[in-house]
Image (cartoon, rainbow, N blue to C red):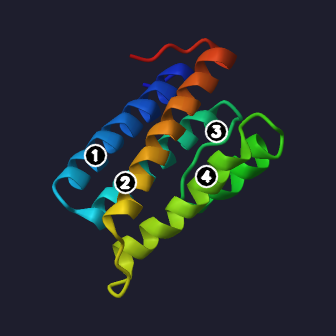
């Protein structure tokens, strides 16, 4: 069964909320790198939800970085800081997951989680104001 656009957007936002909750729990438990990784995935899913409204289905991690900037930031629909945060956190996520010589400080993870939370709030606001989608 094929899902409607609204169902796909809601599923992406729900996944973003789940990843943000995980990032907060990991941060509280002292898992700094993993908190950063989950914060990125919160942004990834929230960005994917908004990109669906542009007819863009995200199938790789490079797509949100590129398409979010092209379709949403450059058009002025979304503030540039959100594109910068998404790009920065994508790079930090890759370093935290794959580079054994990279270590992040607790402050880095706190910033990542706070930015992910604000990013999610902004994407939900955008979807509600422009498409009437209401989230829990």
Please tell me whether mark 1 or mark 4 is closer to you in this view: 1
| Contact check, label 2 and label 3, Cβ < 8 Å | no
In which quadrant of the rendered view does residue 88 lie? bottom right
CA distance for labels 1 and 4: 23 Å
CA distance for labels 3 and 1: 25 Å
How far from the left and from the top, in percent, is residue 48? 55, 42
How far from the left and from the top, in percent, is residue 87? 60, 60
Tell me if 73 is positioned left or right of 29 in this view.
right
The residue at the point 74 percent across, 41 percent down is 72
In which quadrant of the rendered view does residue 53 lie? top right
The residue at the point 53 percent across, 40 percent down is 119
Residue highlighted by disc 2: 110
Is residue 105 placed above or below 22 in the rendered structure? below
| Contact check, label 4 and label 3, Cβ < 8 Å | yes
Indicate which disc, 2 or 4, sits on the residue closer to the N terminus.
Answer: 4
Residue highlighted by disc 3: 51
């Amino acid at each position: 069964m094929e899902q409607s656009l609204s169902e796909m957007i809601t599923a992406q936002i729900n996944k973003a909320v789940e990843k943000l909750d995980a990032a907060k729990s990991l941060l509280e438990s002292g898992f700094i790198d993993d908190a950063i990784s989950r914060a990125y995935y919160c942004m990834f899913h929230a960005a994917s939800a908004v990109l669906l409204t542009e007819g863009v289905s995200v199938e790789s991690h490079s797509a949100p970085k590129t398409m979010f900037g092209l379709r949403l930031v450059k058009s002025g629909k979304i503030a540039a800081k959100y594109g910068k945060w998404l790009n920065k956190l994508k790079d930090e996520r890759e370093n935290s997951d794959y580079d054994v010589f990279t270590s992040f400080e607790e402050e880095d993870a706190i910033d990542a989680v706070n930015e992910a939370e604000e990013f999610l709030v902004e994407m939900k606001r955008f979807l509600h104001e422009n498409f009437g989608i209401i989230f829990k």
